[in-house]
């Protein structure tokens, strides 16, 4: 049964992209992403830096060059891997995403399988984790887009659909928490915390802190609270067979040893480099509204509440990590600071697990009606999943400009990658600016709402240049000189903004399939 779920997940997170590739036809080239293409292209841009042999991340969507830092090393490594294999960056990205999705599914089942639940409830929780989303479909037809459509890091399915590092982060987080389930029933001992695991925990903590700092903070907090809970049980004498705290303390200490230096380095890096500091200052992710979260995590959330009470009342050791995670994340996302939403990482996992406990708690009263209840919950959780898939395919069928390049644009990007200097600065419309660093490694003035420093002002400046170039050529030419622009991209998106006629200082360097690239002559 679980194997079938994994096969379905693997197909759902791979076939839509293959289909989109073939739907491109002869006039377009699929950009590789069906959800949140801005972030998707930013991951490719990071991989491009690695492909060029770099291990230090700089901001490819910002015109100015920063000193850089050892951040996003996972994507830099994938870029190096693509160069070693001689494979396209996009292929390596999606292969990594697919493999990490399988890793996440494996860790999710290992975690769920240790819970003190009947087998049907374990299968229910696993299905919900891998395939389910919320009930945002209820309001989607009214033009309202809730979190279950776009907060990918909160849901295993969306994580698997969007990028590899969300999947890998959630899988590592679950692996770190498996020993803290404390389940010793069903003739199985608790997981042995060996020195080999301790070394892996150090490495896993460092990797997790680099990929998802908030995930490692969650892991440390959940483990620490579980240890405190166990200590209180020992002290009060409540538990008949209190869990041994020594292995837990060692696991927590080695996670701290691996994760804390990476966290401190990341914090220092983004504060000491002025450009990285400016990027970090605008990278705000506040939590969605309470009604949004309620809808986006229901119907599983409605079962998770009685499930949480059941775990607390019956002192089920295997469920305490879920309960602590559920309550802790609920508190953290309400704290008044600009990065609240980051603590939603993986939140659907404890919701689904506690929903299974909630279902179990109803077993005595519902008896033969328990299966229809679980089927109903699953049925209410799938429409948003289907809508996400259908929206991606609609974008592929209509050749959505955010998802596809024209063949002329793709050819022009190949020319830029092969014929311009690696540090060239290219001026392009906002949409084209999203693609240029991902496909050429060249910098742009604007291309991403977070990774372009002072993004709103830069987007306005780029748009104003193309809108006013024909009417104010002297001012436009001065803008190019002042900003140090090396090339101006002139394709479909730029042509929609305005004309670029007889602008002084521009020399045609490329002209093919409706796309021109101008070289800016230095004055």
Image (tube, rainbow, N blue to C red):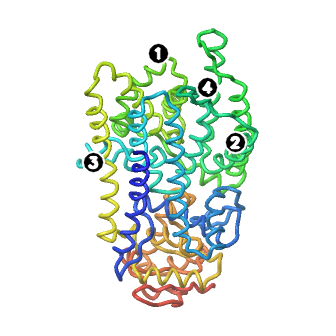
Q: CA distance from mark 2 to mark 4?
A: 18 Å
Q: CA distance from mark 1 to mark 3?
A: 37 Å
Q: Is residue 239 left or right of residue 395?
A: right
> Residue, x 73% and y 37% (percent of image)?
194
Which of the two discs, 4 and 3, labels the residue nearer the N terminus? 3
Q: Which residue is mark 2?
A: 201
Which of the two discs, 1 and 4, labels the residue nearer the N terminus? 4
Total of numbered circles in the picture? Answer: 4
Q: CA distance from mark 3 to mark 2?
A: 41 Å
Which of the two discs, 1 and 3, labels the residue nearer the N terminus? 3
Q: Helix, strand or loop at disc 3?
A: helix
- Residue 42 location (% of width, % of height): 54, 63
Q: Which residue is mark 1?
A: 313
Count residues near mark 3 (Cα–Cα under 10 Å), then give few for <14, some for 14-19, many for 20+. Answer: some
Q: Nearer the viewer, mark 4 or mark 3?
A: 4
Q: Is residue 443 left or right of residue 354?
A: right
């Amino acid at each position: 049964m679980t194997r079938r779920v994994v096969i379905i997940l693997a197909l759902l997170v791979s076939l839509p992209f293959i289909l989109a590739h073939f739907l491109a036809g002869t006039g377009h080239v699929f950009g590789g992403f069906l959800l949140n293409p801005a972030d998707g292209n930013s991951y490719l841009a990071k991989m491009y830096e690695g492909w060029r042999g770099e291990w230090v991340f700089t901001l490819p969507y910002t015109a100015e060059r920063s000193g850089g830092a050892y951040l996003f090393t996972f994507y830099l490594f994938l870029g190096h891997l693509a160069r070693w294999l001689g494979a396209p960056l996009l292929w390596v990205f999606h292969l990594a995403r697919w493999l990490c999705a399988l890793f996440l599914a494996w860790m999710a089942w290992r975690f769920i399988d240790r819970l003190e639940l009947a087998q049907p409830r374990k299968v229910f929780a696993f299905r919900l984790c891998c395939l389910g989303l919320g009930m945002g479909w209820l309001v989607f037809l009214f033009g309202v887009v809730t979190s279950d459509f776009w907060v990918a890091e909160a849901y295993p399915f969306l994580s698997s659909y969007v990028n590899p590092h969300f999947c890998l982060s959630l899988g590592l987080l679950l692996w770190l928490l498996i020993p803290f389930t404390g389940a010793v029933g069903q003739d199985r001992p608790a997981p042995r915390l060996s020195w080999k695991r301790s070394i892996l925990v150090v490495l896993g903590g460092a990797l997790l802190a680099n990929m998802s700092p908030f995930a490692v903070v969650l892991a440390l907090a959940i483990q620490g609270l579980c240890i405190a809970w166990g200590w209180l049980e020992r002290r009060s004498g409540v538990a008949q067979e209190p869990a041994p705290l020594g292995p837990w303390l060692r696991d927590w200490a080695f996670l701290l040893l691996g994760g804390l230096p990476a966290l401190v380095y990341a914090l220092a890096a983004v504060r000491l480099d002025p450009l990285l500091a400016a990027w970090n200052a605008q990278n705000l992710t506040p939590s969605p509204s309470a009604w949004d979260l309620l809808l986006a995590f229901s119907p599983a959330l409605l079962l998770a509440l009685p499930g949480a009470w059941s775990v607390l009342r019956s002192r089920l050791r295997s469920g305490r990590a879920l309960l602590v995670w559920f309550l802790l994340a609920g508190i953290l996302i309400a704290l008044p600071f600009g990065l609240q939403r980051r603590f939603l990482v993986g939140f659907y996992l404890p919701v689904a697990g506690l929903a299974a406990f909630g279902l179990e708690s109803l077993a005595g009263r519902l008896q033969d009606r328990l299966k229809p209840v679980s089927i109903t919950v699953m049925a209410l959780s799938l429409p948003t999943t289907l809508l996400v898939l259908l929206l991606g395919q609609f974008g592929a069928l209509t050749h959505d400009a955010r998802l596809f390049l024209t063949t002329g644009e793709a050819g022009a990007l190949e020319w830029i990658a092969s014929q311009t200097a690696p540090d060239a600065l290219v001026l392009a419309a906002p949409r084209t600016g999203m693609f240029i660093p991902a496909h050429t490694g060249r910098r742009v003035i604007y291309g991403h709402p977070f990774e372009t420093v002072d993004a709103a002002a830069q987007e306005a400046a780029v748009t104003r240049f193309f809108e006013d170039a024909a009417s104010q050529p002297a001012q436009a030419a001065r803008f190019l000189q002042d900003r140090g622009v090396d090339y101006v991209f002139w394709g479909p998106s730029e042509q929609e903004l305005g004309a670029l006629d007889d602008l002084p200082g521009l020399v045609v360097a490329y002209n093919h399939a409706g796309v021109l690239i101008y070289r800016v002559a230095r004055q």
